[in-house]
Image (spheres, rainbow, N blue to C red):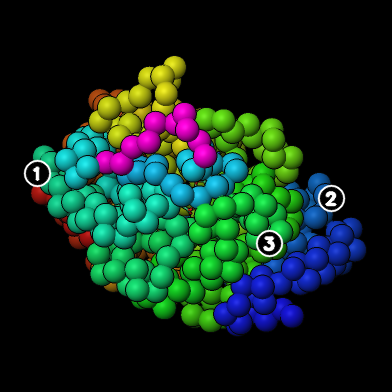
Amino acid sequence: MYQVTSLKAEEFISHEEIQETLAYADANKDNEALLDEILAKARLGKGLNHREASVLLACEIPEKVEELYQLAERIKKDYYGNRIVLFAPLYLSNYCVNGCVYCPYHLKNKHIARKKLTQEEIRKEVTALQDMGHKRLAIEAGEDPVNNPIEYILECIQTIYSIKHKNGSIRRVNVNIAATTVENYRKLKEAGIGTYILFQETYHKESYETLHPTGPKHDYAYHTEAMDRAMEGGIDDVGLGVLFGLDKYRYEFAGLLMHAEHLEAVHGVGPHTISVPRVKRADGIDPGAFDNSIDDETFAKICALIRVSVPYTGMIISTRESQEVREKVLPLGVSQISGASKTSVGGYADPEIKEEITSEQFDVSDQRTLDEVVNWLMKLGYIPSFCTACYREGRTGDRFMELCKNMQILNCCHPNALMTLKEYLEDYASDETREIGMALIDRELETIPNPKVKKKAYEYIHDIGEGKRDFRF
Ligand code: SAM
Protein backbone atom coordinates (compact mmCIF):
# COMPACT_ATOMS: atom_id res chain seq x y z
CA MET A 1 0.00 0.00 0.00
CA TYR A 2 1.23 3.51 -0.83
CA GLN A 3 2.44 5.48 2.16
CA VAL A 4 4.60 8.51 1.59
CA THR A 5 6.04 8.48 5.12
CA SER A 6 6.77 4.77 5.27
CA LEU A 7 10.43 3.83 5.54
CA LYS A 8 9.88 0.75 3.38
CA ALA A 9 10.91 1.18 -0.25
CA GLU A 10 7.94 -0.69 -1.64
CA GLU A 11 5.51 1.48 0.29
CA PHE A 12 6.90 4.95 -0.51
CA ILE A 13 7.66 3.91 -4.10
CA SER A 14 4.49 1.88 -4.42
CA HIS A 15 4.18 0.06 -7.76
CA GLU A 16 0.37 0.24 -7.53
CA GLU A 17 0.44 3.99 -6.92
CA ILE A 18 2.69 4.51 -9.95
CA GLN A 19 0.41 2.39 -12.11
CA GLU A 20 -2.66 4.27 -10.91
CA THR A 21 -0.84 7.55 -11.54
CA LEU A 22 -0.03 6.54 -15.11
CA ALA A 23 -3.62 5.43 -15.73
CA TYR A 24 -4.88 8.74 -14.27
CA ALA A 25 -2.44 10.63 -16.50
CA ASP A 26 -3.59 8.72 -19.60
CA ALA A 27 -7.23 9.38 -18.77
CA ASN A 28 -6.61 13.09 -18.29
CA LYS A 29 -3.92 13.99 -20.80
CA ASP A 30 -6.48 15.76 -23.01
CA ASN A 31 -8.57 17.15 -20.16
CA GLU A 32 -7.94 20.84 -20.79
CA ALA A 33 -9.74 22.06 -17.67
CA LEU A 34 -7.56 19.87 -15.45
CA LEU A 35 -4.40 20.73 -17.40
CA ASP A 36 -5.10 24.43 -16.92
CA GLU A 37 -5.71 23.86 -13.23
CA ILE A 38 -2.38 22.04 -12.89
CA LEU A 39 -0.53 24.72 -14.85
CA ALA A 40 -2.14 27.41 -12.68
CA LYS A 41 -0.94 25.59 -9.57
CA ALA A 42 2.55 25.26 -11.05
CA ARG A 43 2.55 28.99 -11.76
CA LEU A 44 2.43 29.63 -8.00
CA GLY A 45 5.96 28.25 -7.86
CA LYS A 46 5.28 25.84 -5.01
CA GLY A 47 5.66 22.67 -7.05
CA LEU A 48 3.45 19.83 -8.22
CA ASN A 49 2.86 16.35 -6.88
CA HIS A 50 3.66 13.20 -8.85
CA ARG A 51 0.08 12.78 -10.08
CA GLU A 52 -0.26 16.34 -11.36
CA ALA A 53 3.16 16.32 -12.98
CA SER A 54 2.47 12.95 -14.61
CA VAL A 55 -0.63 14.36 -16.31
CA LEU A 56 1.49 17.13 -17.82
CA LEU A 57 4.11 14.61 -18.90
CA ALA A 58 1.47 12.55 -20.72
CA CYS A 59 -0.09 15.62 -22.35
CA GLU A 60 0.85 16.20 -25.98
CA ILE A 61 -1.24 19.30 -26.71
CA PRO A 62 1.35 21.68 -28.23
CA GLU A 63 0.05 24.87 -26.54
CA LYS A 64 0.06 23.23 -23.11
CA VAL A 65 3.56 21.87 -23.59
CA GLU A 66 4.69 25.32 -24.71
CA GLU A 67 3.12 26.81 -21.59
CA LEU A 68 5.02 24.28 -19.51
CA TYR A 69 8.33 25.27 -21.14
CA GLN A 70 7.68 28.96 -20.58
CA LEU A 71 6.78 28.32 -16.97
CA ALA A 72 9.92 26.24 -16.41
CA GLU A 73 12.01 29.11 -17.80
CA ARG A 74 10.30 31.61 -15.54
CA ILE A 75 10.68 29.48 -12.41
CA LYS A 76 14.31 28.87 -13.26
CA LYS A 77 14.90 32.62 -13.55
CA ASP A 78 12.99 33.42 -10.34
CA TYR A 79 14.73 30.82 -8.20
CA TYR A 80 18.15 30.43 -9.76
CA GLY A 81 18.66 33.59 -11.80
CA ASN A 82 21.12 33.06 -14.64
CA ARG A 83 23.79 31.26 -12.65
CA ILE A 84 25.10 27.83 -13.68
CA VAL A 85 27.31 26.06 -11.18
CA LEU A 86 30.24 24.10 -12.59
CA PHE A 87 31.83 20.90 -11.30
CA ALA A 88 33.85 17.90 -12.44
CA PRO A 89 33.63 14.22 -11.60
CA LEU A 90 36.73 12.55 -10.18
CA TYR A 91 36.89 8.78 -10.66
CA LEU A 92 38.77 7.19 -7.78
CA SER A 93 38.45 3.51 -8.58
CA ASN A 94 36.61 1.33 -11.06
CA TYR A 95 36.94 -1.89 -9.09
CA CYS A 96 33.41 -3.16 -8.63
CA VAL A 97 31.74 -6.32 -7.40
CA ASN A 98 28.31 -5.56 -8.85
CA GLY A 99 26.80 -6.90 -12.05
CA CYS A 100 24.97 -3.79 -13.38
CA VAL A 101 24.31 -4.74 -17.01
CA TYR A 102 24.53 -1.14 -18.34
CA CYS A 103 27.84 -0.30 -16.66
CA PRO A 104 31.27 -1.39 -17.93
CA TYR A 105 32.59 -1.57 -14.37
CA HIS A 106 30.59 -4.75 -13.76
CA LEU A 107 32.53 -7.61 -12.22
CA LYS A 108 32.51 -9.86 -15.28
CA ASN A 109 34.11 -7.26 -17.56
CA LYS A 110 37.62 -8.64 -17.94
CA HIS A 111 38.88 -6.31 -20.68
CA ILE A 112 38.45 -2.97 -18.96
CA ALA A 113 41.60 -1.62 -17.28
CA ARG A 114 41.02 -1.78 -13.52
CA LYS A 115 42.53 1.12 -11.64
CA LYS A 116 42.44 2.60 -8.19
CA LEU A 117 44.14 5.91 -7.51
CA THR A 118 46.83 6.09 -4.86
CA GLN A 119 46.91 9.22 -2.68
CA GLU A 120 49.83 10.44 -4.79
CA GLU A 121 47.81 9.95 -7.98
CA ILE A 122 44.91 11.80 -6.38
CA ARG A 123 47.25 14.72 -5.74
CA LYS A 124 48.12 14.76 -9.46
CA GLU A 125 44.46 14.55 -10.52
CA VAL A 126 43.37 17.29 -8.15
CA THR A 127 46.26 19.52 -9.16
CA ALA A 128 45.24 19.08 -12.82
CA LEU A 129 41.62 19.89 -11.92
CA GLN A 130 42.65 22.94 -9.91
CA ASP A 131 44.79 24.11 -12.82
CA MET A 132 41.68 24.11 -14.99
CA GLY A 133 39.84 26.21 -12.38
CA HIS A 134 37.57 23.65 -10.74
CA LYS A 135 36.50 24.19 -7.12
CA ARG A 136 33.82 21.49 -6.82
CA LEU A 137 34.22 17.79 -7.41
CA ALA A 138 31.93 14.80 -7.42
CA ILE A 139 33.93 11.72 -6.49
CA GLU A 140 32.90 8.46 -8.10
CA ALA A 141 33.81 4.88 -7.31
CA GLY A 142 32.62 1.36 -8.00
CA GLU A 143 31.43 -0.76 -5.10
CA ASP A 144 34.11 -3.04 -3.76
CA PRO A 145 34.47 -3.57 0.00
CA VAL A 146 38.03 -4.89 -0.40
CA ASN A 147 39.48 -2.41 -2.90
CA ASN A 148 37.35 0.66 -2.12
CA PRO A 149 36.31 0.38 1.55
CA ILE A 150 34.89 3.46 3.26
CA GLU A 151 38.30 4.12 4.84
CA TYR A 152 39.76 4.52 1.34
CA ILE A 153 37.02 6.95 0.32
CA LEU A 154 37.51 8.97 3.54
CA GLU A 155 41.27 9.11 3.01
CA CYS A 156 40.73 10.33 -0.55
CA ILE A 157 38.38 13.09 0.66
CA GLN A 158 40.94 14.22 3.21
CA THR A 159 43.66 14.28 0.56
CA ILE A 160 41.48 16.24 -1.88
CA TYR A 161 40.64 18.93 0.69
CA SER A 162 44.30 19.21 1.76
CA ILE A 163 45.70 20.13 -1.66
CA LYS A 164 46.41 23.83 -2.19
CA HIS A 165 48.13 24.42 -5.51
CA LYS A 166 48.84 28.03 -6.53
CA ASN A 167 45.48 29.77 -5.90
CA GLY A 168 43.61 26.50 -6.32
CA SER A 169 41.60 24.55 -3.80
CA ILE A 170 38.71 22.12 -3.88
CA ARG A 171 36.08 23.63 -1.65
CA ARG A 172 33.31 21.09 -1.97
CA VAL A 173 33.49 17.34 -2.50
CA ASN A 174 30.23 15.64 -3.41
CA VAL A 175 30.19 11.88 -3.21
CA ASN A 176 28.64 9.34 -5.59
CA ILE A 177 29.28 5.92 -4.11
CA ALA A 178 27.11 2.87 -3.60
CA ALA A 179 24.42 2.65 -0.95
CA THR A 180 25.94 2.10 2.47
CA THR A 181 25.21 2.01 6.20
CA VAL A 182 24.09 4.84 8.52
CA GLU A 183 27.44 4.56 10.27
CA ASN A 184 29.33 5.08 7.00
CA TYR A 185 27.10 8.00 6.04
CA ARG A 186 27.94 9.56 9.40
CA LYS A 187 31.65 9.16 8.60
CA LEU A 188 31.16 10.83 5.22
CA LYS A 189 29.34 13.70 6.90
CA GLU A 190 32.20 14.09 9.38
CA ALA A 191 34.66 14.12 6.48
CA GLY A 192 32.92 17.31 5.28
CA ILE A 193 31.21 16.11 2.13
CA GLY A 194 28.72 18.27 0.28
CA THR A 195 25.93 16.30 -1.38
CA TYR A 196 25.62 12.52 -1.21
CA ILE A 197 24.51 11.44 -4.68
CA LEU A 198 23.05 8.07 -5.49
CA PHE A 199 21.15 7.32 -8.66
CA GLN A 200 18.22 5.01 -8.28
CA GLU A 201 18.89 3.81 -11.85
CA THR A 202 15.29 2.55 -12.08
CA TYR A 203 12.36 2.71 -9.69
CA HIS A 204 10.78 -0.37 -11.27
CA LYS A 205 11.63 -3.15 -8.83
CA GLU A 206 11.41 -6.06 -11.26
CA SER A 207 13.56 -4.29 -13.86
CA TYR A 208 15.92 -3.17 -11.14
CA GLU A 209 16.53 -6.77 -10.10
CA THR A 210 17.10 -7.90 -13.69
CA LEU A 211 19.45 -4.99 -14.43
CA HIS A 212 21.42 -5.64 -11.22
CA PRO A 213 21.56 -9.43 -11.28
CA THR A 214 24.45 -9.90 -8.86
CA GLY A 215 26.30 -8.15 -6.06
CA PRO A 216 25.11 -6.02 -3.14
CA LYS A 217 23.39 -3.57 -5.49
CA HIS A 218 20.88 -6.31 -6.37
CA ASP A 219 18.96 -5.47 -3.17
CA TYR A 220 16.28 -3.00 -4.34
CA ALA A 221 15.07 -2.06 -0.88
CA TYR A 222 18.57 -1.43 0.48
CA HIS A 223 19.37 0.79 -2.50
CA THR A 224 16.04 2.66 -2.49
CA GLU A 225 16.15 3.32 1.25
CA ALA A 226 19.74 4.63 1.11
CA MET A 227 18.77 8.30 1.23
CA ASP A 228 16.83 7.74 4.44
CA ARG A 229 19.92 6.17 5.98
CA ALA A 230 22.07 9.04 4.66
CA MET A 231 19.74 11.53 6.32
CA GLU A 232 19.75 9.48 9.52
CA GLY A 233 23.55 9.69 9.36
CA GLY A 234 23.31 13.50 9.29
CA ILE A 235 23.70 14.17 5.57
CA ASP A 236 20.96 16.63 4.70
CA ASP A 237 21.91 17.34 1.08
CA VAL A 238 21.15 14.30 -1.03
CA GLY A 239 21.04 13.98 -4.82
CA LEU A 240 18.57 11.71 -6.62
CA GLY A 241 18.68 10.51 -10.21
CA VAL A 242 17.31 8.02 -12.68
CA LEU A 243 19.32 6.48 -15.50
CA PHE A 244 16.93 7.19 -18.35
CA GLY A 245 16.75 4.44 -20.93
CA LEU A 246 16.54 1.53 -18.53
CA ASP A 247 12.77 1.50 -18.00
CA LYS A 248 9.75 3.47 -19.17
CA TYR A 249 10.35 7.15 -18.59
CA ARG A 250 6.88 7.93 -17.30
CA TYR A 251 7.22 5.26 -14.64
CA GLU A 252 10.65 6.59 -13.65
CA PHE A 253 9.45 10.17 -13.52
CA ALA A 254 6.54 9.34 -11.17
CA GLY A 255 8.92 7.29 -8.97
CA LEU A 256 11.46 10.11 -8.86
CA LEU A 257 8.86 12.64 -7.67
CA MET A 258 7.47 10.16 -5.15
CA HIS A 259 10.97 9.74 -3.77
CA ALA A 260 11.33 13.53 -3.44
CA GLU A 261 7.92 13.74 -1.74
CA HIS A 262 8.94 10.96 0.63
CA LEU A 263 12.15 12.73 1.70
CA GLU A 264 10.27 15.96 2.28
CA ALA A 265 7.52 14.20 4.25
CA VAL A 266 9.86 12.18 6.46
CA HIS A 267 12.88 14.45 6.88
CA GLY A 268 11.38 17.87 6.23
CA VAL A 269 13.76 18.48 3.34
CA GLY A 270 13.55 17.32 -0.25
CA PRO A 271 16.46 16.33 -2.47
CA HIS A 272 19.17 18.98 -2.94
CA THR A 273 19.66 17.92 -6.55
CA ILE A 274 18.20 15.68 -9.22
CA SER A 275 20.38 14.29 -12.02
CA VAL A 276 19.01 13.15 -15.34
CA PRO A 277 21.63 10.87 -16.93
CA ARG A 278 20.82 8.88 -20.06
CA VAL A 279 22.50 5.54 -20.86
CA LYS A 280 25.63 6.05 -22.99
CA ARG A 281 27.85 3.85 -25.07
CA ALA A 282 30.65 2.29 -23.04
CA ASP A 283 33.04 -0.65 -23.15
CA GLY A 284 30.85 -3.64 -24.05
CA ILE A 285 27.70 -1.54 -23.57
CA ASP A 286 25.44 -0.62 -26.48
CA PRO A 287 22.78 1.91 -25.43
CA GLY A 288 20.61 0.45 -28.23
CA ALA A 289 20.30 -2.70 -26.13
CA PHE A 290 18.07 -0.76 -23.75
CA ASP A 291 14.84 -0.19 -25.59
CA ASN A 292 13.48 2.56 -23.37
CA SER A 293 15.76 5.31 -24.58
CA ILE A 294 14.15 8.74 -24.79
CA ASP A 295 14.54 11.31 -27.55
CA ASP A 296 15.82 14.85 -26.96
CA GLU A 297 12.32 16.36 -26.98
CA THR A 298 11.10 14.03 -24.24
CA PHE A 299 14.30 14.65 -22.33
CA ALA A 300 13.67 18.40 -22.46
CA LYS A 301 10.08 17.93 -21.32
CA ILE A 302 11.25 15.87 -18.34
CA CYS A 303 13.75 18.62 -17.40
CA ALA A 304 11.05 21.29 -17.62
CA LEU A 305 8.70 19.20 -15.52
CA ILE A 306 11.28 18.56 -12.84
CA ARG A 307 11.85 22.31 -12.70
CA VAL A 308 8.19 23.16 -12.14
CA SER A 309 7.50 20.17 -9.86
CA VAL A 310 10.38 20.70 -7.41
CA PRO A 311 11.44 24.36 -7.81
CA TYR A 312 13.85 24.24 -4.84
CA THR A 313 15.79 21.26 -6.10
CA GLY A 314 18.86 21.86 -8.25
CA MET A 315 19.11 19.99 -11.54
CA ILE A 316 22.33 18.51 -12.91
CA ILE A 317 23.26 17.74 -16.52
CA SER A 318 26.54 15.95 -17.10
CA THR A 319 28.82 15.75 -20.13
CA ARG A 320 26.91 12.62 -21.15
CA GLU A 321 24.87 15.22 -23.05
CA SER A 322 26.15 17.09 -26.08
CA GLN A 323 26.60 20.85 -26.30
CA GLU A 324 23.42 21.00 -28.41
CA VAL A 325 21.25 19.15 -25.89
CA ARG A 326 22.73 21.11 -23.00
CA GLU A 327 21.87 24.32 -24.79
CA LYS A 328 18.29 23.14 -25.21
CA VAL A 329 17.77 22.24 -21.54
CA LEU A 330 19.80 24.92 -19.75
CA PRO A 331 17.00 27.50 -19.86
CA LEU A 332 14.43 24.91 -18.76
CA GLY A 333 15.81 24.67 -15.28
CA VAL A 334 19.30 23.21 -15.12
CA SER A 335 21.37 24.70 -12.29
CA GLN A 336 24.59 22.65 -12.42
CA ILE A 337 26.68 21.17 -15.20
CA SER A 338 29.96 19.33 -15.32
CA GLY A 339 32.74 20.66 -17.53
CA ALA A 340 35.82 19.10 -19.15
CA SER A 341 34.97 15.77 -17.52
CA LYS A 342 37.00 12.60 -17.76
CA THR A 343 35.29 9.36 -16.81
CA SER A 344 38.50 7.34 -16.70
CA VAL A 345 40.43 6.67 -13.50
CA GLY A 346 43.40 9.05 -13.52
CA GLY A 347 42.25 10.71 -16.77
CA TYR A 348 42.93 14.33 -15.83
CA ALA A 349 46.65 14.07 -15.13
CA ASP A 350 47.18 11.28 -17.62
CA PRO A 351 44.62 11.26 -20.47
CA GLU A 352 43.99 7.82 -21.95
CA ILE A 353 44.34 7.00 -25.62
CA LYS A 354 40.96 5.95 -27.00
CA GLU A 355 42.22 3.00 -29.06
CA GLU A 356 43.88 1.38 -26.07
CA ILE A 357 42.20 -0.53 -23.27
CA THR A 358 40.58 2.14 -21.16
CA SER A 359 39.24 2.53 -17.63
CA GLU A 360 36.47 4.85 -18.80
CA GLN A 361 32.94 4.55 -17.48
CA PHE A 362 31.14 5.86 -20.54
CA ASP A 363 31.64 8.06 -23.61
CA VAL A 364 31.55 11.77 -22.95
CA SER A 365 29.55 13.77 -25.54
CA ASP A 366 30.65 17.26 -24.54
CA GLN A 367 34.43 17.21 -24.83
CA ARG A 368 35.18 20.92 -24.55
CA THR A 369 37.72 22.41 -22.15
CA LEU A 370 36.51 24.21 -19.04
CA ASP A 371 37.51 27.55 -20.56
CA GLU A 372 35.40 26.77 -23.64
CA VAL A 373 32.44 25.84 -21.44
CA VAL A 374 32.78 29.02 -19.33
CA ASN A 375 33.08 31.14 -22.47
CA TRP A 376 30.05 29.44 -24.08
CA LEU A 377 27.90 29.89 -20.96
CA MET A 378 28.65 33.61 -20.82
CA LYS A 379 27.87 34.06 -24.51
CA LEU A 380 24.50 32.41 -23.83
CA GLY A 381 23.85 34.95 -21.07
CA TYR A 382 24.64 32.75 -18.05
CA ILE A 383 26.97 33.40 -15.12
CA PRO A 384 29.34 30.43 -14.71
CA SER A 385 29.66 29.93 -10.95
CA PHE A 386 32.24 28.06 -8.89
CA CYS A 387 30.46 28.95 -5.68
CA THR A 388 30.56 26.64 -2.66
CA ALA A 389 29.43 29.18 -0.07
CA CYS A 390 26.16 27.69 1.17
CA TYR A 391 27.65 24.45 2.28
CA ARG A 392 30.67 26.16 3.87
CA GLU A 393 28.39 28.60 5.71
CA GLY A 394 26.29 25.70 7.02
CA ARG A 395 23.38 26.50 4.71
CA THR A 396 22.53 22.89 3.88
CA GLY A 397 19.28 20.97 3.97
CA ASP A 398 16.31 23.03 5.14
CA ARG A 399 18.48 26.13 5.73
CA PHE A 400 19.40 26.14 2.04
CA MET A 401 15.75 25.60 1.12
CA GLU A 402 14.82 28.63 3.28
CA LEU A 403 17.19 30.78 1.25
CA CYS A 404 15.48 29.66 -1.96
CA LYS A 405 11.99 29.99 -0.53
CA ASN A 406 12.71 33.54 0.68
CA MET A 407 14.06 34.43 -2.78
CA GLN A 408 17.34 35.64 -1.27
CA ILE A 409 19.34 34.14 -4.09
CA LEU A 410 19.90 37.49 -5.80
CA ASN A 411 21.42 38.93 -2.61
CA CYS A 412 23.52 35.90 -1.83
CA CYS A 413 24.16 33.33 -4.54
CA HIS A 414 24.36 35.95 -7.26
CA PRO A 415 27.26 37.97 -5.75
CA ASN A 416 28.95 34.72 -4.68
CA ALA A 417 28.78 33.50 -8.27
CA LEU A 418 30.30 36.74 -9.53
CA MET A 419 33.15 36.57 -7.02
CA THR A 420 34.03 32.98 -7.90
CA LEU A 421 33.82 33.83 -11.59
CA LYS A 422 36.19 36.71 -10.99
CA GLU A 423 38.65 34.29 -9.31
CA TYR A 424 38.38 32.00 -12.33
CA LEU A 425 39.00 34.86 -14.76
CA GLU A 426 42.03 36.08 -12.80
CA ASP A 427 43.65 32.68 -12.36
CA TYR A 428 42.69 30.41 -15.26
CA ALA A 429 40.82 32.06 -18.14
CA SER A 430 42.01 32.67 -21.70
CA ASP A 431 42.25 36.32 -22.78
CA GLU A 432 38.97 36.24 -24.66
CA THR A 433 37.07 34.56 -21.83
CA ARG A 434 38.52 37.05 -19.34
CA GLU A 435 37.41 39.99 -21.43
CA ILE A 436 33.84 38.70 -21.79
CA GLY A 437 33.74 37.80 -18.10
CA MET A 438 34.97 41.14 -16.77
CA ALA A 439 32.26 42.97 -18.74
CA LEU A 440 29.65 40.52 -17.52
CA ILE A 441 30.66 40.99 -13.88
CA ASP A 442 30.39 44.79 -14.25
CA ARG A 443 26.87 44.45 -15.64
CA GLU A 444 25.70 41.86 -13.15
CA LEU A 445 27.00 43.67 -10.04
CA GLU A 446 24.50 46.42 -10.81
CA THR A 447 21.57 43.99 -10.49
CA ILE A 448 22.18 43.14 -6.80
CA PRO A 449 19.06 44.48 -5.03
CA ASN A 450 20.34 45.04 -1.48
CA PRO A 451 22.54 48.22 -1.46
CA LYS A 452 24.76 47.02 1.41
CA VAL A 453 25.40 43.67 -0.28
CA LYS A 454 26.05 45.47 -3.55
CA LYS A 455 28.65 47.77 -1.97
CA LYS A 456 30.40 44.85 -0.28
CA ALA A 457 30.35 42.81 -3.50
CA TYR A 458 32.05 45.68 -5.37
CA GLU A 459 34.75 45.78 -2.69
CA TYR A 460 35.33 42.02 -2.73
CA ILE A 461 35.49 41.91 -6.53
CA HIS A 462 38.05 44.70 -6.42
CA ASP A 463 40.10 42.84 -3.79
CA ILE A 464 40.10 39.65 -5.88
CA GLY A 465 41.68 41.73 -8.64
CA GLU A 466 44.35 42.67 -6.09
CA GLY A 467 45.13 39.00 -5.40
CA LYS A 468 42.85 38.19 -2.46
CA ARG A 469 40.68 35.04 -2.64
CA ASP A 470 37.73 33.16 -1.18
CA PHE A 471 35.20 35.80 -0.15
CA ARG A 472 31.61 34.79 0.38
CA PHE A 473 28.22 35.92 1.62
N1 SAM B 1 28.99 2.78 -8.02
C1 SAM B 1 28.06 3.74 -7.51
C2 SAM B 1 26.68 3.18 -7.45
O1 SAM B 1 26.53 1.98 -7.59
O2 SAM B 1 25.74 3.93 -7.26
C3 SAM B 1 27.98 5.03 -8.27
C4 SAM B 1 29.07 5.45 -9.14
S1 SAM B 1 28.76 5.22 -10.86
C5 SAM B 1 30.40 5.61 -11.20
C6 SAM B 1 27.76 6.61 -11.30
C7 SAM B 1 26.57 6.39 -12.20
O3 SAM B 1 26.96 6.22 -13.54
C8 SAM B 1 25.70 5.20 -11.94
O4 SAM B 1 24.83 5.41 -10.86
C9 SAM B 1 24.95 5.04 -13.27
O5 SAM B 1 23.69 5.67 -13.24
C10 SAM B 1 25.83 5.79 -14.27
N2 SAM B 1 26.20 4.91 -15.40
C11 SAM B 1 26.67 3.65 -15.36
N3 SAM B 1 26.84 3.17 -16.61
C12 SAM B 1 26.45 4.15 -17.46
C13 SAM B 1 26.37 4.24 -18.89
N4 SAM B 1 26.71 3.24 -19.69
N5 SAM B 1 25.93 5.40 -19.41
C14 SAM B 1 25.58 6.43 -18.63
N6 SAM B 1 25.64 6.40 -17.29
C15 SAM B 1 26.06 5.27 -16.69
**How far is disc 1 from disc 3 in space, using C-alphas?**
56 Å
Circle 1: is it few (<14), some (14-19), or many (20+) Cα within 10 Å?
A: few
Q: In x, y percent, where is residue 401?
A: 44, 71
Residue 443 occupies which quadrant of the picture? Answer: top left
**How far is disc 1 from disc 2 in space, using C-alphas?**
55 Å
Could you say which is closer to the camera, residue 287 or residue 284?
Answer: 284
The residue where tag 3 is placed is 205
Which is more N-terminal, label 3 or label 2? Answer: 2
The magenta stretch spans residue 110: yes
Work out whether residue 163 can be spotted.
yes
Q: Which residues are magenta?
A: 108-117
Which quadrant would the C terminus be assigned to in this image?
bottom left
Which tag is nearer the camera, tag 1 or tag 2? 2
The residue where tag 1 is placed is 466
Q: Tag 3: residue type?
A: Lys
Work out whether residue 52 can be spotted.
no
